[in-house]
Image (cartoon, rainbow, N blue to C red):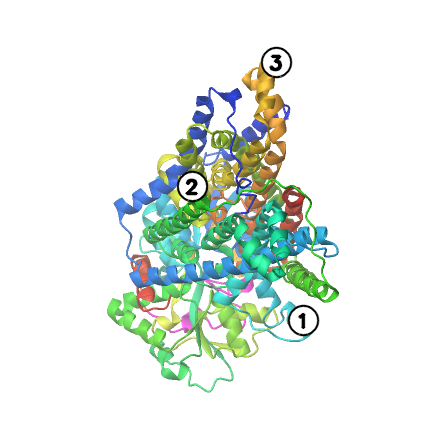
Amino acid sequence: MTAGPLVAPVGEEASSRRTYRSGWVWWAATAVVLLPALIPPISLAWQVITNGTGSSVRFARLVELFAGTLALTGAVTLTALAIGTATAWLTTRTDLPGRRIWMIVAALPLVIPSYMAALTIIGATGPDGLIETVFGVRIPTPYGFSGAWLALSVFLAPMAHLIVTPGLRAIDPATEEAATGLGAGRLRVFFTVTLPQLRPALVSAGLMVGLYTVSDFGAVSLLRFDTFTRAIFTLYAGQIDRRPAATLSVVLMALALLILLIERRTRTRAGYRAGSTKHRRQLLRLGTGQRAVALGLLGSYAALALALPMGVLLLWLTRGLVAGNEIGSLWEEVGRSVGVSVGAAVVAVAASMPVAMVTTWRRRRYLSELVETSVWSIYSLPHIAVGVAVIAFALRFARPLYQTVTLLVLVYVGMFMAQSASTIQDSLRRTNPDLEDASRGLGRSALQTLARVTLPLTQPGILAGAALVFLSVMKELPATLLLRPNGFETLAIRIWSSTGEGFYTRASAAGLALLAVSIVPLLVMTHRDLSP
Amino acid sequence: MKRSIPTLVACVLVVAACGTGSGDAEGPLVIYSGRSEELVQPLIDQFTAETDIVVDVRYADSTELAATLLQEGESTDADVFFAQDPASLGSVASMMGQLDSSILDKVDARFADGDGRWVGTSGRVRTFIYNTDTANALPQSIDDVVDPAWSGQLGIAPTNGSFLAFVSAMILERGEAETLEWLKALAASEPQDFSGNSPIVAAADTGEIQGGLVNHYYLLRLRAEGGGQNAENLFIPGGDVGSLVMPAGAGILAGSDKQDAAQQFVEFLLSTSAQEYFANETFEFPLVEGVDPAEGLPNLDEINAPDIDLSQLADVLDDATRLVSEAGLV
């Protein structure tokens, strides 16, 4: 899961699009896209109800997993929000030297999947770790809660950064200037004026980070912290009876949905209308000392989130190569990863069009809200649970699709469609419906208008959406692990399996390849989200 | 933008086309391997080079693949199941066909399924790994392992398949109640949790822990990489599950439409070259007459292994998982 600009610009109302008045086609398309996605989780829940829960899910164990998952989620969300808000504020509000570059630097760690974040921590600490190799000091590897918390916080902060940055820009400078004019200090202005107005963005960012943490599998597995996802995989991989894994999957899905629904209630009540004064904001001038502190903070973040992972990967790679280990060809893995990522991005964008259309219409408000909630519900489902659900469903009802690339891509589309839908929605909201009406008025058909007017105008959203989905699929691990066809090893799978067996040379080469491929879509995305 | 719509449709079709066409008689031999890729792939490559049979492998945990096979049922694409432990093999024995006697005759009947549905291909033995500087008396039976002297100094991998197979064997030997008692005693000695065997061996080598329950070959692998000088394997002599022999093995799915190729693969695993590969590359015990174990290992007959019907391990595997969880080890 990767964050996009998830909320519509605050206070903006969807315009009705008269051009596409015969809306039933769009509604039908939306149904075609959404209904299949709802089947697997429902069928899994049904199976658990009818087949029973299996023997080894103890109540005490459930409580333990709940506590672990919630504690980690809370801690990671708060920390990532704090880091992301700080980087966003420093790079949008102050006259920091090179702030444009820092803005992108703070977003870059988004390409690093959570399991690589965990590997970074493992590779940097402990005997012969990067830190001991370079500085001669040995830091014990923080297995358990602290390690998982650190890995996820540092590498999810860019999500918060990307959502809070546009949020900060949307705030009318007049309110803050008024407060300053009335004699409030900087800190007071930030906490009493800026922060409350930032609430919708913070809630969104918190939701994204929180949902990601609840469903993260890679970091908690490698750093050995027991959460639902780790327990599900342990049961799935270690037990013949699949019912306990299915039961935990249903519980985890329910937990994620609960978090989502709570957020949606909060969101409708939050909301500050952007004011009409659109005068330029004065950047805050930092003193020399403040500037040093700001640069120090951003620099240490970049060191931790970018230099450290790269350092660990390079250390492993050189160590392995010196020792004579072979990496073997990775081209096939690169091809598979890029292939499914492009496929999923293209299909997701196409599938998002009708969803984005109907949710930006003003008519049939309840129906369109239902669509929107459904899309986000599917997005919030933890991937490992989706994998368990889809396998069970495909084996019983869609055998020809089982263990095929087609099914894998369709599952990716379902899981990540919310990302492309939201960027396309955003673009649609920004386009003026009068242009479409003019096109119809001049004699073009609805289809021609769609191709010639609506799609070109939505192009930025389409591109950004495709980039987001591409990036998410590149990084995805648990669903791929469960659903890949025989012999279909992607870069993510290669990193995972090579690490599991202690073949770090190969894992690091695959990791570097994954980062290299991911950087292009990330730049496409940051260009859109961060450019003023 | 207009031009991109046909492109989009084309992409979707290409993706869809990639996904179809598995499971026909013309396709590759499909092997579900619970043994790791790094270990097995060189063997597979050699097999393909010798026979021209193209192979597709699904790598995952043995138990996971067994459960997958059961879930897939008759519609599975798999032709051969090559697993790390007898419990996984046994749990899908009902889906496997009887092996040819020419295959079964090569291996001691102790290391094959009683009904001849799977055959052992190499032997792995449970051992007690210890730091050579330890002041504790070495365990003479599995019950000595939970002695308070080792409290806080043991390493275990409670979710690992081999540990669970060991617990399963204990259930067969002693029954559930006594096994649970033993597991609770182990939990009370506050062992350190590891994700797998090899970190336990590494920790015993550095002295981070004093002892641990592992399989025999991890130490030899560590030594092959230059470490492992401060750790030693103990084949617990008491004749109990502490020295359980767990063969990795293979069986052929009854529903496979590539019986010939599948049989060739199983025969290949028992060939001298494959047995030597197991002995010298993975440091497991070869199970076919005429191939010696790696240097520094005793002969398999010299180990005081318990007398357990390995075919029954599968029946109690899920009970083992449950007991481990009940004892509070996971």
The residue tagged 1 is: A133
In this orientation, does residue B318 appear? yes
Badge 1 and badge 2 in a common chain: no
For mark 3, what is the residue?
A442
Nearer the observer, B109 or A423: A423
Marks 1 and 3, how far apart in space? Answer: 71 Å
* Res. B305 visible in picture: no
Q: What residue would you read off at disc 2?
A: B259
Which stretch appears magenta?
A: B280-306
Q: Earlier in the sequence, mark 1 or mark 3?
A: 1
Name the subunit of mark 2: B
Q: Is A515 placed left or right of A217 in the picture?
A: right
Q: Main secondary structure of the magenta part?
A: loop
Q: CA distance from mark 2 to mark 3?
A: 69 Å
Q: Is residue A23 left or right of residue A506?
A: left
Q: Could you give the CA–CA distance between mark 1 and mark 2, rounded to whole angstroms? A: 53 Å
Q: Position of residue A387 (x, y in %)?
A: 43, 46
Which residue occupies 51% across, 56% down? A218
**Quick check: do tags 2 and 3 share a chain?**
no
Amino acid type of the residue tagged 3 in the rendering: Leu
Q: Quadrant of the C terminus of chain A?
A: top right
Three-letter amino acid code of the residue under disc 1 = Thr
* Residue B164 part of the magenta-drawn span: no
Q: Observer-nearest residue: A239 or B217?
A: A239
